[in-house]
Image (tube, rainbow, N blue to C red):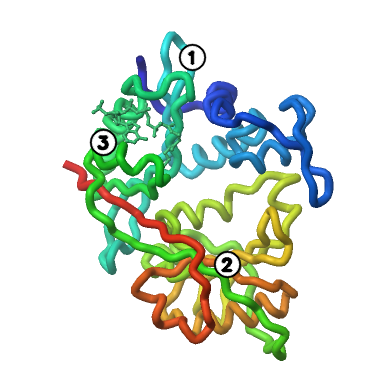
Amino acid sequence: MKIRMARLEDAKGITRVHCSDIEKWYRHIGDSKIEDAYENLTIRDRYLHGGPWMSVESCAIHLNTLLLENQCPIVAEINGKVVGHAEVLISEEPIKGEMKRIAQLDVLEVHKKFRRRGIGRAILEYLFELAKDKECELITVTPDPNAVGFYSKLGFNETVYSGLSVDIDLPETPKREVNIKMEEFPWEKIKTKEMIFGKFQSSYCHWFVIKDKIFGINDKIYYETGIMEHKYYYTLKESFSNPKIVYLYLWGKNPKEALSFAINRAKYLGFKTLRTLVSVEDYNKIREFKPKIIEKSIILSKRVQ
Ligand SMILES: CC(C)(COP(=O)(O)OP(=O)(O)OC[C@H]1O[C@@H](n2cnc3c(N)ncnc32)[C@H](O)[C@@H]1OP(=O)(O)O)[C@@H](O)C(=O)NCCC(=O)NCCS
């Protein structure tokens, strides 16, 4: 087995790994969907099964964006065939209020037929060396609930962030205009800021999504990114599955004030529900907006040695 950095030529192999996990494929027609063969699906249909790795075309576009940003896609191969894939995004950003250089393991997938043979472990061992070379202090991951045992075996034992995914109803109360300057801000503008809403993984990973757009997919939903009231950097993004729901990602300081602006903006845009993530600590500061908790998430870390 060989573990190495991925190239654009790996798009096909990476797609095969991710598709191995999908049992049934569906074609979307308006609000409904019917089971169909993979070949009959559009690139967007395939994307809705799990992201850009579901089609060679979208996978290549995504890999290209990662590589242009000097980030780190990794593959595991056996006899020249890709059997595992990971993506690691390196950044400097606040972790528990302190600036740290971190490597976030954003994606990890082993081909279904090759699991429990040491490939996941081998990819992580490669990552431990990579993080050392890149002078990172921590490796972080947002574990899938089924993979918590795997990460714990590999030394991810500290929780650096606990978040609550919440829905906030946007009632038909009068709308107030919010000052908005729409622009795609560079990472440097937000790297030292706390990500106070929408943080599921590293702040950098969420910023990267602003860059990582695919024609025919991301332009089919409402999306805006910019600066609110001269101080809050944000993205509002319509849900792929429900046009009434908007997702909020926001960098800044004051959760209560920031959320009241974001709620007004989302209302102004005609959405009915604002969905976001807030830290367990900040949850109490936004209680007056009656957030309904949907689920919990955590970010685990391992110290680089
Ligand atoms: C999670 C995943 C990457 C693990 O890869 P893998 O190649 O099967 O794992 P390995 O064979 O290297 O296992 C390493 C160790 O972890 C254990 N392990 C593997 N998967 C585990 C799991 N889901 N829960 C608990 N322990 C697990 C193995 O038993 C092994 O332990 P051992 O060394 O004591 O024998 C793989 O199952 C996968 O692709 N799952 C679907 C996608 C996913 O959940 N990715 C993680 C997203 S955060």
Q: Quadrant of ligand 1?
A: top left
Question: Percent position (x, y) of residue 67?
Answer: 50, 37
The kind of residue tagged 3 is Phe
The mark nearer the N terminus, 1 or 2, is 1
Pair 1/2: label in front? 2
Identity of the residue furthest to the left in this view: 305
SS type, badge 1: strand
Q: Which quadrant: the C terminus?
A: top left
Q: Is residue 8 visible?
A: no
Q: Mark 2 points at which residue?
A: 275
Task: Assess whether mark 1 and mark 3 are in contact (beta carbons under 8 angstroms).
Answer: no
Crowding near the residue tagged with mark 2, few <14, some 14–19, many ≥20 C-alpha atoms within 10 Å: many
The image quadrant that residue 107 belongs to is top left
Pair 3/2: label in front? 2
Nearest to the observer: residue 24 or residue 74: 24
Identity of the residue furthest to the top in this view: 79
237 relative position to 142: left or right: right
SS type, badge 2: strand
Residue, x 45% and y 79% (percent of image)? 255
The mark nearer the N terminus, 3 or 1, is 1
Identity of the residue furthest to the right in this view: 30
The image quadrant that residue 127 belongs to is top left
Q: Mark 3 points at which residue?
A: 128
Q: Which quadrant: the N terminus?
A: top left
Nearest to the observer: residue 244 or residue 149: 149
Question: Percent position (x, y) of residue 12?
Answer: 59, 23
Question: Percent position (x, y) of residue 248?
Answer: 56, 67
Cα separation, mark 1 vs mark 2, equals 40 Å
Q: Can residue 181 be seen in this view?
A: yes
66 relative position to 270: left or right: left
Q: Which numbered dot is residue 81?
A: 1
